[in-house]
Image (cartoon, rainbow, N blue to C red):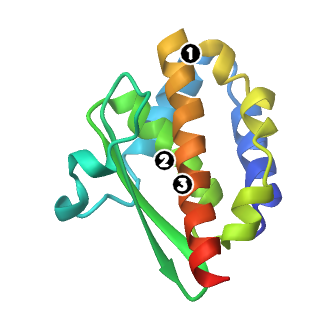
């Protein structure tokens, strides 16, 4: 599935909910199914800077595609990173780097987060793309 197709699927899913309380619950549920980071990678080196909560992110290249794992100490933040992993994990570095993230605005996520969480969301996307850039350079 392409990044765009996954994003469209997410927009469709979010449109089924009537209010933001239901959407928050859905995001929290997504966090429960996140591909969890191996404990050996849950170190300070893998913490995403700029997040209010602790978010650990690890990436590995597998057949030219990047597989991400993550964890967070906050349930909502864990759901947000799970949403991003759903979009970007299993994609090539090039596809990750050229992907836009307008689906976040389409579902209204950023506007329904506190300023610090919204900044954290931006930091998460930035870190995912930094990993993609590093792997693109390494693979290229």
* Mark 1 / mark 3, whichever is N-terminal: 3
Q: Residue at x 32, y 58 (%)?
A: 36
The C terminus appears in which quarter of the rendering? bottom right
Q: In the shown orientation, is residue 134 left or right of residue 46?
A: right
The N terminus appears in which quarter of the rendering? bottom right
Q: Residue at x 76, y 66 (%)?
A: 95
Residue 3 x/y as whole percent: 75, 60
Residue beneath label 1, please?
Answer: 113
Considering the numbered disc 2 on the image, is that residue within a helix, a strand or a loop? helix
Residue 11 x/y as whole percent: 77, 40
Q: CA distance from mark 1 to mark 3?
A: 19 Å
Of residues 107 and 52, which is closer to you in this image? 52
Q: Which disc, if any, is residue 82?
A: 2
Residue beneath label 3, please?
Answer: 85
Q: Residue at x 66, y 69 (%)?
A: 93
Q: Do the numbered discs 1 and 2 sit on residues whose CB atoms are within 8 Å? A: no
Residue located farthest toward the bottom when viewing the structure as drawn: 63
Q: In the shown orientation, is residue 47 left or right of residue 98?
A: left
Q: CA distance from mark 1 to mark 2?
A: 16 Å
Considering the numbered disc 3 on the image, is that residue within a helix, a strand or a loop? helix
Residue 82 x/y as whole percent: 48, 47
Q: CA distance from mark 2 to mark 3?
A: 5 Å
Q: In the shown orientation, is residue 48 left or right of residue 74?
A: right
* Mark 1 / mark 2, whichever is N-terminal: 2
Answer whether residue 140 is visible to the viewer in this image.
Answer: yes
Q: Do the numbered discs 2 and 3 sit on residues whose CB atoms are within 8 Å? A: yes
Q: Do the numbered discs 1 and 3 sit on residues whose CB atoms are within 8 Å? A: no
Would you place residue 8 above or below residue 96 in this image?
above
């Amino acid at each position: 599935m392409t990044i765009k197709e996954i994003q469209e699927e997410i927009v469709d899913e979010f449109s089924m909910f009537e209010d933001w309380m239901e959407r928050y619950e859905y995001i929290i549920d997504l966090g429960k199914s996140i591909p969890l980071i191996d404990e050996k990678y849950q170190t300070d080196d893998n913490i995403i800077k700029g997040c209010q909560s602790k978010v650990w992110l690890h990436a590995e290249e597998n057949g030219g595609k990047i597989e991400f794992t993550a964890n967070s100490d906050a349930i909502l933040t864990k759901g947000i990173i799970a949403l991003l992993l759903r979009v970007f994990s299993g994609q090539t570095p090039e596809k990750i780097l050229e992907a836009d993230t307008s689906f976040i605005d389409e579902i209204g996520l950023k506007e329904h987060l506190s300023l610090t969480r919204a900044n954290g969301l931006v930091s998460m996307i930035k870190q995912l793309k930094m990993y993609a850039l590093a792997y693109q350079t390494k693979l290229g």
